[in-house]
Amino acid sequence: MVTSPSCALIADDDAFFRIALGALLTRQLGFTTVLEAASLDDALDLLGTRPEISLALFDLSMPGMKQAASLAAVRECAEHVTLAVVSGSSSRQDILGALGAGVHGYIPKALGPAELVKALETVLSGQIYVPPILARAGSAEMSVAPVSADKAQECLARLTQRQREVLQALVAGRSNKEIARLLGLGEGTVKIHVAALLRTLQLPNRSAAAAFGARELR
């Protein structure tokens, strides 16, 4: 359990879900204040005027939300906030897009209350929550052709130690700026490492790398 959480924001246009999620935050996770927003604009207004917000939970289908692009904008303007998606979508594209935008977790609404609380505890503890569906191979929605386990480990073995660290950070949904701070590197250096590991792994983008790393890193 995370100690002394204070203020959380739930951004979702489903009023009943906001009530249910707010109850979990206050009764089981110890938040003293839960703010609500029914649109992206309302959520951004609150993030801009309530600096005490430490956790923000966003739905992907509320008014104004353009998924990954909007989430990336939120990360830019509220870097101090732990940001997670709580969504009814279990699409790999949505999950990878959100993680690529730098959120700290993607939590499906289909989880039961106990599992949802555990997922939130993971996020609040500083870890990244990735739903199990992301690790399941064979989905028709998978945007990157699957490779054999031997081939995947062969690709990983060609990465330098620093590139593996950057890959782990991509799996965690961190932005280049966050990776630079985490590893003590320049942001330009991080971009070079990302480009190099994408070439080595023969992957098209950082979202694909995050999915690969979530499956293959041990």
Image (tube, grey):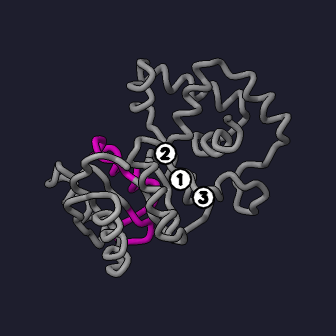
Do we see residue 31 in this rendering?
A: yes
Q: Which residue is mark 3?
A: 93
What secondary structure is marked by label 3? helix
**Residue 130, horizontal then vertical, whole percent:** 56, 51
C-alpha separation, residue under disc 3 versus residue under disc 1? 6 Å
Amino acid at circle 3: Gln
Q: Is residue 18 magenta?
A: no
- Earlier in the chain: of badge 2 and badge 1, it is 1
Q: Residue at x 22, y 53 (%)?
A: 6
C-alpha separation, residue under disc 2 versus residue under disc 1? 15 Å
Which callout, 2 or 1, points to the residue nearer the camera? 2
What secondary structure is marked by label 1? helix
Q: Which mark is residue 128?
A: 2
Amino acid at circle 1: Gly
Do we see residue 103 in this rendering?
A: no
Q: Quadrant of residue 217?
A: top right
**Residue 205, horizontal then vertical, whole percent:** 61, 41
**Residue 46, horizontal then vertical, whole percent:** 19, 59
Q: Report if the CB atoms under discs 3 and 1 are less than 8 Å apart.
A: yes
Q: Residue at x 35, y 62 (%)?
A: 28
Q: Residues within 10 Å of mark 1 (few under 14, many from 20)?
A: many
Q: Residues within 10 Å of mark 3 (few under 14, many from 20)?
A: some
Q: Total number of numbered labels?
A: 3
Q: Report if the CB atoms under discs 3 and 2 are less than 8 Å apart.
A: no
Q: Which residues are magenta?
A: 58-83
Amino acid at circle 2: Ile
Q: Residue at x 73, y 28 (%)?
A: 156
What secondary structure is marked by label 2? loop
Q: Which residue is mark 1?
A: 97
- Earlier in the chain: of badge 3 and badge 2, it is 3
**Residue 140, horizontal then vertical, whole percent:** 75, 63
